[in-house]
Image (tube, rainbow, N blue to C red):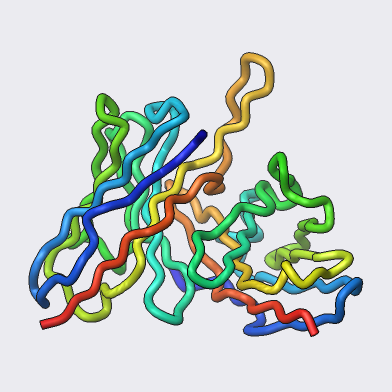
Amino acid sequence: EVQLLESGGGVVQPGGSVRLSCAGSGFTFSNHAMTWVRQAPGKGLEWVSTISPTGTTTYNPDSVKGRFTISRDNSENTLFLEVNSLSAEDTAVYYCARRLVVVVGDTYYYHYALDVWGQGTTVTVSS
Amino acid sequence: QSSLTQPASVSGSPGQSITFSCTGTSSDVGGYNYVSWYQQHPGKAPKLLIYGVTNRPSGVSSRFSGSKSGNTASLTISGLQAEDEADYYCISYTGYGTYVFGTGTQVTVL
């Protein structure tokens, strides 16, 4: 079964840091770009970071640049997100998601869509 | 990188069809055929319904369909069912590995 499992959330003090993990199983982790998405309580989804399959390239929206660092360990099939200088606005459920790859015969089609999601890990920033 | 605009809520009766929009710009929705749609039930992770504007992943009901015209993408749910009551989000690729998400639409089945 294809699965993503996040961990590392909890209650963090303002100004603190947190490192989230996402373990992939049931698929070839190193074939897929991976993304973190967050959702504040009662709010919509927000893209926060993406990393290429090899980990050499990362992408972030301007809103989180400098505070969010995405990385991966393909030998351990694990994705990470480190968030620094946390504030109340970072309180959210953080999801990891896999970029869709459609295989037709011997051809790989890389789509900008997220086809597998984890169950989420909750980060609460509070003193 | 502002959000794509979706109607806050849409409702319909069982068996009806509903369509709702996702409006962006020529830099995102209008510029790429990489619009995807997601369904999210309360407390659950999002689920991919449509990718590449019109394509359904294996296992997704044919009652869900997507389209695009200019800078606006649309999701249609045909034969509305009680289980379709959920939040729906669109996502568009915006170039250079970046994404922009929609504001979300709450679908209510009357």
| Front residue of this view, candidates A119 and A80 | A119
Q: In the rendered image, which quarter is residue A64 located in?
A: bottom left
Instruction: Please say if B21 is above or below A47.
Output: below
Up-down relation of residue A95 to residue A80 (above or below): below
Q: How many marks?
A: 0
B87 on left or right of A16: right
A56 and A17: which one is in front?
A17
B10 with respect to B46 (left or right): right
* Residue at the image point whose x is 26% and y is 24% from the top: A75
Q: Quadrant of residue A102?
A: top right
Q: Residue at x 53, y 53 (%)?
A: B93
Residue A30, image quadrant: top left
Which residue shows up at 56% across the image and 33% down it?
A101
Relative vertical location of residue A106 with respect to residue B79 in this rendering, above or below: above
Of residues A84 and A2, the one drawn nearer to the viewer in this rendering? A2
Residue A87 in the image: x percent, y percent?
A: 18, 77
Which percent across, then down, holds residue A119?
43, 56
| Quadrant of the snapshot with the C terminus of chain A | bottom left
Q: What percent of the width, then of the height, locates residue A50?
A: 36, 48
